Amino acid sequence: MSTGRWVIHLPTTLAGRDDTVALLAALRGSLAHVPVLDFDHATIRRGDEASPRTTIWCDAPIGEPRAGPGSRRCHRFVNHPGPCA
């Protein structure tokens, strides 16, 4: 039996990147209370491309501890201006 992480691929009928990012942000907001979902590492890609995947959130460590359970991560979009939050 595998003990690794599983990934859910959820295709949409959306045609644009911005709409797809908006949907992912809405899903993250509405499902943030579900502890088994890791939206911090969510990526998107065009359905007809095997790669590359586009990272959505910065996910940089904030404060201490720098990694591991209980660490805080940046929830702003990747390449955001200003400090992580």
Image (cartoon, rainbow, N blue to C red):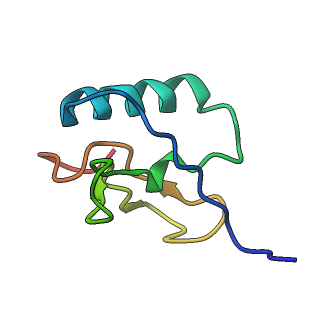
> Is the residue 14 above or below the residue 45 in the image?
above
Q: In this view, does 60 lie above or below 44?
A: below
Q: Residue at x 30, y 56 (%)?
A: 55
Q: Nearer the viewer, residue 84 or 15?
A: 15
Q: Name the residue rendered at 33%, 64% in the picture.
A: 50
Q: Residue at x 44, y 61 (%)?
A: 63
Q: Which residue lies furthest to the right in this view?
A: 1
Residue 38 position, x and y percent, is 57, 50
Picture coordinates of residue 80 (x, y %)?
Answer: 17, 46
User: Where is 6 relative to 43, above or below?
Assistant: below
- Quadrant assignment, res 26: top left
Total tally of numbered discs in the picture: 0
What quarter of the picture does the C terminus occupy?
A: top left
| Horizontal arrangement in the rendering, residue 36 relative to residue 72 (left or right) | right
Horizontal placement of 56 versus 9: left or right? left
**Image position of 32 (left or right of 84):** right
**33 or 54: which is nearer to us?**
54
Quadrant into which the N terminus falls: bottom right
Whole-percent x, y for residue 60 in the image = 36, 61
The residue closer to the viewer here, 66 or 26, is: 26
- The picture quadrant where one finds residue 77 is top left
- Which residue sits furthest left? 81
39 left or right of 46? right
Q: What residue do we see at 44% from left, 51% from top?
A: 42
